[in-house]
Amino acid sequence: MGAALCAKELASLVRELHDLTPARANGQAVRSRGTVGRPILDEATLSVVWNGRALHLGHTQGFWLLARLARSANQYVTHLDLIQEIWDDDFTDTTVLRAGVRRLRIKLRRGGMGDLADAIVGHHGRYMLSLNGSESHTEVTTTSP
């Protein structure tokens, strides 16, 4: 079975689960407002599922970058930590990281995931996957594996 087919099946399952588990208020089914779920990153197919859509990213630095940011969503990760974890190269600099983030955002937008691309926020030598809908954060946390 091809990776694209697996990603489509995964997206279909996510859509079904999303439809089966609506929030309830006074016994009425309603959708939550202002809440954003986490993207699902499937290492088996190297795909991301977001809001019922699946996108095959492949074995790329973009996939691993998104996976790393998703692991610590809503927390900043320093450029140095990302370079060490994703590129594993002492000679890589921040321009390579910025170019990688730019390519990832472009690929996400082309795949219909513009809101996920916009959730990747950079600020003073750090990046974050902001899933709470706000780009202004006062708590800055750096994490290492």
Image (spheres, grey):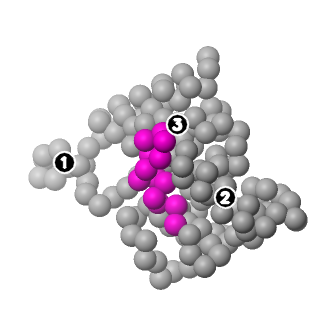
Q: Nearer the viewer, mark 2 or mark 3?
A: 2
Q: How far apart are marks 1 and 2 (CA)?
A: 40 Å
Q: How far apart are marks 2 and 3 (CA)?
A: 20 Å
Residue 56 location, quadrant: top right
Q: How far apart are marks 1 and 3 (CA)?
A: 27 Å
SS at badge 3: strand
* Total marks placed: 3
Tell me residue 19's x, y (percent).
Answer: 29, 36
Q: How crowded is mark 2: few (under 14 residues within 10 Å), some or many (20 or more)?
A: few
The mark that comes first in sequence, 1 or 2, is 1
Residue 112 visible: yes
SS at badge 1: strand
Residue at x 79% of width, y 56% of height: 87
| In the image: residue 110, left or right of residue 61 | left
Tell me residue 26's x, y (percent).
Answer: 11, 52
**Label 1 is placed on what type of residue?**
Val
The mark that comes first in sequence, 1 or 3, is 1
The residue labelled by disc 1 is: 30
Residue 40 visible: no
| In the image: residue 9, left or right of residue 46 | left
| In the image: residue 77, left or right of residue 35 | right
**Quadrant holding the C terminus:** bottom right
**Label 3 is placed on what type of residue?**
Leu
The stretch drawn in magenta includes residue 11: no
**Quadrant holding the N terminus:** top right
Tell me residue 119's x, y (percent).
Answer: 46, 60
**Label 2 is placed on what type of residue?**
Ala
Q: Residues within 10 Å of mark 1 (few under 14, many from 20)?
A: few
The residue labelled by disc 2 is: 99
The residue labelled by disc 3 is: 55
The mark that comes first in sequence, 2 or 3, is 3
For the record, the magenta segment spans 109-121
